[in-house]
Amino acid sequence: MKKVFVLVAPLLTIACLFGSSRLTRMETPVASVDGKIITARDLDTLIQTWQRRSGSAVPVDSLKFTALDTMINFQLEQIRIDSIKTSLDQNWDYVQKRLDDNQQYLYKVIFDRQITSRIVIDSAKVAKYYNEHLDGYKDPEKIKARHILIKKPKPDTAGVKSEDKRKKLISEAEGFARKRAEAVYKRAQSGENWDSLVTAFSEDKATMTKGGDLGEISRGKMGSVFDSAAFIGTAPAIVGPVSTRLGYHVIRIDEFKPARQKPLDMDVENSIHGDIIREEERTYADVYLDSLKKATTVTYNEEVMALPDSLVNPRTWIVLMNSVDTVHQRTINENLPRYMRWKHKAIDSLTVEDKKDMIDKLMPSFLLSSSARANGYFNHPEYVKACDEYTMAEAKLRYSGIVEDKEYQPSDSELAVYYNNNLNKYKIERKLHVHHIIFQDSALAVVIRDSILAGSDFVEIAKRYYPGEPEIREVAYNLDFIGPDDMGQAFYQAVDTLQKGQVSMPVKTGWGYHLVKLVNRKNDIALEQARPGIRQALKDARNSARKNAIIAEWKEGSDVVIFEKALKKYKPAEKKVIQVEPEFSKKAGS
């Protein structure tokens, strides 16, 4: 091992020296935008991403200036987005909306800290819960059953105006089905072959070919009427007819399994564990909320509440909790419509007591928010991250409203001009779906063609006559969709004259004589089909031009510095791997 160290140590030293130097150079600034630095590493990351996407090693010198310009533009955009985000963070109305829309993250933190953390479950608690809730951990009664279904006919009552006559027609139809089911039941009871009865009478397509087998059924699966007749506690037995919405059932019970107590195994323990958590979460949540209510002094701004809501500033306080946390008129305005629908009241008829009643119903959320603030949960990383992402998404949305022309809708004439200027985009290169058979003898090809025209299946004939091994013949006849260059111009032109489903006369190519069948034909994309894509392309082009123009203006007014020397010295990061040969390792270790 000493030999290895002696050989490798100098290499490690050199690698550290040069690697450290390389790392330092990668952190060198190559540009700055209003003081925001773009490093060689930032530039390198973008260039390598472009090279990976292009699939080829594009010379770095041809990329780095374009990449740097792209990164400068990105920084200019990011500065604007950050500016919008900062203004949103300082906007009272927006902050209130963000609080409302992200309350679930606060509630989760409260739940984890104040409720879930209090729940302790051990094996003794599980066993106690099991013994107190034995009925909840039972396998229900089960039967293995078969049935014969006689559906109730639906009489034609269209045009029947008399309700009594309509009911009579329905009753007669049901009576016919019931008598039919009763007859089948008697024959089954008398010992007639069950499978024969199923084949002759059952109208249940899902089971009629399986002897009417319904499989194993738990009590409750088929409905109370079915259960009352089928779960009689004995087997074998034949019962019926049973009327359900599906029709009349004659049921054969092959096996009956009584309900049984589930043992306290791992599956049941896991189920109980979840049941206990849910129950105790509800209990602790109620206790916690009650404790907040008892510890909170609520003060109402009754003078303002007596005013029409339209006259009250949304930022005016309506409720104070412990003289610290505030509910504003904005919250009242947002919840009034829902409350009025619930109370069936008009907005101008709400009294101060009505508003107090509404606030009382909203009080749990107010109390939880107040508790979150008191416990510092507004600074919890999960909540801070959620709010930050929420605001960033809004900032990007507002930014897009600046750089995009949201009002622009391309006209029909613009769509047509774009389509006509880009016809090649809408031409289908491979538009003919073709099956073919190759013959060396044109006369034989003609004979086979006559056979196909007389009704023989083209694919089966192709599999029989196509040259090559059987596995080749299974697939080679199908050329799928082809274009003019795939099989030669003469071949393509011959196929192009065919109608869908037609078979050609023998077509000569360098491979022999082909019988060709046109299976399908694709048409070029028409303007009507292309409209959605063209509309989006024109919008994208308009937005891109607008965005580039706006960024160019920003660039003129910004402090953009390019460090020419650093940019000139920039070279892409190289990833080198030093490998120790296995043979060398063995010798060194010996």
Image: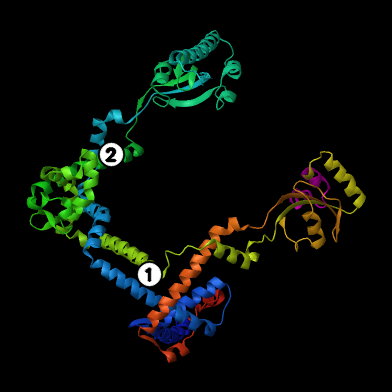
Q: Could you tell me residue 405's position as x and y percent? A: 43, 67
Q: Is residue 233 visible?
A: no
Which residue is rendered at x = 22% and y = 48% of the image? 335
Question: Which numbered dot is residue 402?
Answer: 1
| 579 w.r.t. 184: above or below | below
> What is the magenta range?
459-478
What secondary structure do most residues of the magenta stretch adopt?
A: helix
Instruction: Determine the secondary structure under disc 2.
Output: helix
What is the three-letter code of the residue carrying label 2? Asp
Give the camera-side residue of 267 and 50: 50
Which residue is rendered at x = 44% and y = 73% of the image? 546
Instruction: Determine the secondary structure under disc 1.
Output: helix
Q: Could you tell me residue 537's position as x and y percent? A: 53, 65
Would you say 220 lies left or right of 112 here?
Answer: right
Would you say 420 lies left or right of 515 here?
Answer: left
Which residue is label 2 attached to? 275
Disc nearest the viewer among 1 and 2:
1
What is the three-letter code of the residue carrying label 1? Ile
The mark that comes first in sequence, 1 or 2, is 2
Image quadrant assignment for residue 258: top left
The residue carrying pointer 1 sits among few (fewer than 14), some (14 to 19) or many (20 or more) residues within 10 Å by Cα, namely: few
Q: Residue furthest bottom?
A: 565
Q: How many marks?
A: 2
Image quadrant assignment for residue 338: top left
